Amino acid sequence: MPAERRGEEVACEALADTGAVELALPAELIERLRLEPLGEIRAYTADGVRHDYRVFGIPELEVQGKTCHVRAIELPQGTEPLLGAFPLGEMDWHISPAEQCLVPNPESPDGPIFPLV
């Protein structure tokens, strides 16, 4: 991608939420990253309400040294970024509820290993 079209590198905190499926970013982060629109999806939020969201792609996401490339759902401005089950799985992170943190998969601590069958 040409340098003039690349967005800036953005560091932020996100809520790791296994109840969410995808990466969801507030509109201001989508803009700073200069992500290209991919389409729209219909999804429901924790309160059970259905919404239409725009989908953007494809950012490189890094969490504690592990990376993946996933699409991003645009949330309203000022909302908290959500790190859902799909990107967590792509990076092979597990959530430790007791410690309230991400932990590497004990079966593959050096990086994700995916079944192909």
Image: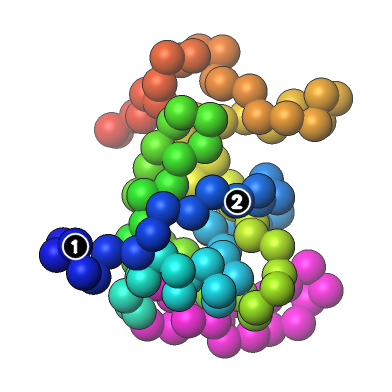
- The answer to whether residue 5 is seen in the rendering is yes
The residue that disc 1 covers is 3
The extreme left residue here reads 2
Near-viewer residue (8 or 112): 8
- Crowding near the residue tagged with mark 2, few <14, some 14–19, many ≥20 C-alpha atoms within 10 Å: few
Q: Is residue 91 left or right of residue 13?
A: left
The residue that disc 2 covers is 12
Residue at (27, 64) in percent of width and height: 6
Q: Is residue 62 left or right of residue 83?
A: left
Q: From this view, report whether residue 73 is shown above or below residue 107.
A: below
Residue at (39, 59) in percent of width and height: 8
Residue 4, by quadrant, is bottom left
Amino acid type, mark 1: Ala
Task: Measuring from the top left, give residue 83's x and y in whole percent.
Answer: 60, 51
**C-beta proximity under 8 Å, tags 1 and 2:** no
Q: From this view, report whether residue 109 is shown above or below residue 17.
A: above
Residue range (magenta): 39-56
The tag earlier along the polypeptide, 1 or 2, is: 1
